[in-house]
Image (cartoon, rainbow, N blue to C red):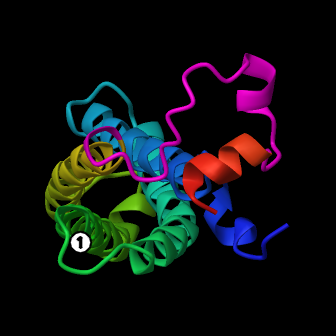
Amino acid sequence: MKLSYLWRGLPGHPVHPPLTDATIGAYTFATVAAFIQVVGITSHAGAYGWWLALVIGAIFSTVTVATGFLDWLTIESGTPLKRTATMHALANATASVFFILAILFGHKHYAHGLVGTGPFILTIVGFGFLTLGGWLGGAITYVHGMRVLNLVTEPARKAAAPIATPEKKEAEGA
């Protein structure tokens, strides 16, 4: 077993993409919770959920960013894939800045069960950049095919197996 499997994942089973689900999920919930608080659907509960989800999203994003950065380092410089991956990283880094600012400036509102106008706007802008980053992440996988093995006839149990089969290693070029 290769040591890099710990942070990159197995052939055909990269670590970074599943981690994005947790980060995106937390930030999406934060955005929805803020919205339902701002429009008056909840009284305090939306604000509490918003701020806590932002904090959880920030925690998840540290591992997500680290694994993404390690994948980014493996991409050949000057390629369209590297440019797309760089834009993906910049969009998500920008989103993270806005979400962290919402955490910092929103804490005093959260403590009173409210979502302030400024922190709400920061959250919405962060979500916009997160959406752009997700779109670009999709291009990395589904257009450029990064870490995609294309073993369409691989039996289901072998395709889903959490092991680096010879077929997966060969398809990845490992």
Label 1 crowd (10 A; few <14 / some 14-19 / many >=20) = some
Indicate the quadrant containing the C terminus: top left, top right, bottom left or bottom right: bottom right
Pinpoint residue 4: horizontal percent, then vertical percent: 70, 74
* Nearer to the camera, 54 or 81: 81
User: Residue visible at 17% across and 69% down?
Assistant: 83
Task: Examine the rendered structure and indicate whether residue 16 appears above or below residue 59.
Answer: above
Q: Is residue 165 something one can see in this rendering?
A: yes
Occupied quadrant, residue 156? top right
Indicate the quadrant containing the N terminus: top left, top right, bottom left or bottom right: bottom right
| Residue 55 on the magenta span | no
Overall secondary structure of the magenta section = loop
Give the secondary structure at mark 1.
helix
Looking at the rendered structure, the number of numbered marks drawn on it comes to: 1
Q: Amino acid at mark 1?
A: Thr
Q: Which residue position holds label 1?
A: 86
Task: Write down the region rendered in magenta.
Answer: 142-165
Occupied quadrant, residue 133? bottom left
Left or right of 110, for residue 153: right
Q: Is residue 11 something one can see in this rendering?
A: no
Task: Examine the rendered structure and indicate whether residue 78 appears above or below residue 171.
Answer: below
Occupied quadrant, residue 117? bottom left
* Nearer to the camera, 36 or 126: 126
User: Residue visible at 35% across and 73% down?
Assistant: 100
Left or right of 87, for residue 62: right
Pinpoint residue 91: horizontal percent, then vertical percent: 20, 64
